[in-house]
Image (cartoon, grey):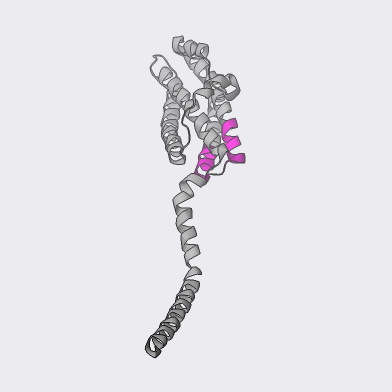
Amino acid sequence: MKIPTAATAALTLLAALTLTGCAGATGSGSDSMPGMDHGASSAASAPNTDFNDADVMFAQMMIPHHEQAVEMSDMILAKDGIDEDVITLAEDIKAAQQPEIDQLQEWLDAWGADGDTGAMGDMGHASGMMSENDMTALDSATGAEASRLFLEQMTMHHEGAIDMAQDEVDNGHNPDAIAMAQTIIDTQTAEIATMQELLEGL
């Protein structure tokens, strides 16, 4: 009986020491592990948390807005007898806005956001969007009249885009989306000034 009792006592002491050692190891490790877990969690969730509703709305609305600007530019570029400066402007608009469309769509995909932008069409001129009649008029116009109509319509279109971009600058969270919005404001404000000068010269 003495041997099992002694063995039991030794095992009990060993278990107690082992548990104490583990607790000490866990305690020291817990100082760094929560930080490590938090870091891993943050890194994994960053693409999904580094945006807010304003960022999503900005992307969803700006995509069809830009798409229409590209369509308008294509219309004017397909015509003969268009002012060379107007042609240059239309080419610049396409060159700037198509890459932004692609980037905006990438963001929506990364954010897991709905890419359906169909509601944009219901906003009409409030957002600078052209109606079907506006687009038909531009498509049908020729020569100097087409140049004038393009400049007038694109000025309104840019003003709507600037308002939308300003909303993103004021209310957005994603730094890349905010940076794009500021670029849109700066670029399209300058283009509006150019278009006003071109209109005066037609």
Q: Position of residue 148 (x, y in %)?
A: 51, 16
Magenta stretch contains residue 179? yes
Regarding residue 187, the answer to whether it shows in the image is no
| Up-down relation of residue 123 to residue 170 (above or below) | above
Q: Position of residue 193 (x, y in %)?
A: 56, 29
| Apparent side of residue 76 relative to residue 185 in the rendered image (left or right) | left
Q: Position of residue 201 (x, y in %)?
A: 53, 20
Regarding residue 160, the answer to whether it shows in the image is yes
Outermost front residue: 1
Q: Nearer the viewer, residue 94 or 191?
A: 94
Magenta stretch contains residue 88? no
| Up-down relation of residue 190 to residue 127 (above or below) | below
Q: Nearer the viewer, residue 37 or 57?
A: 37
Kindly identify the residue that appears in the image at 60 percent across and 22 percent down: 126
Q: Position of residue 64 (x, y in %)?
A: 48, 26
Q: Which image quadrant is residue 52 in? A: top right
**How many numbered marks are there?**
0
Kindly identify the residue that appears in the image at 57 percent across and 32 percent down: 164
Q: Main secondary structure of the magenta part?
A: helix
Q: Which residues are magenta?
A: 163-184
Kindly identify the residue that appears in the image at 47 percent across and 60 percent down: 37
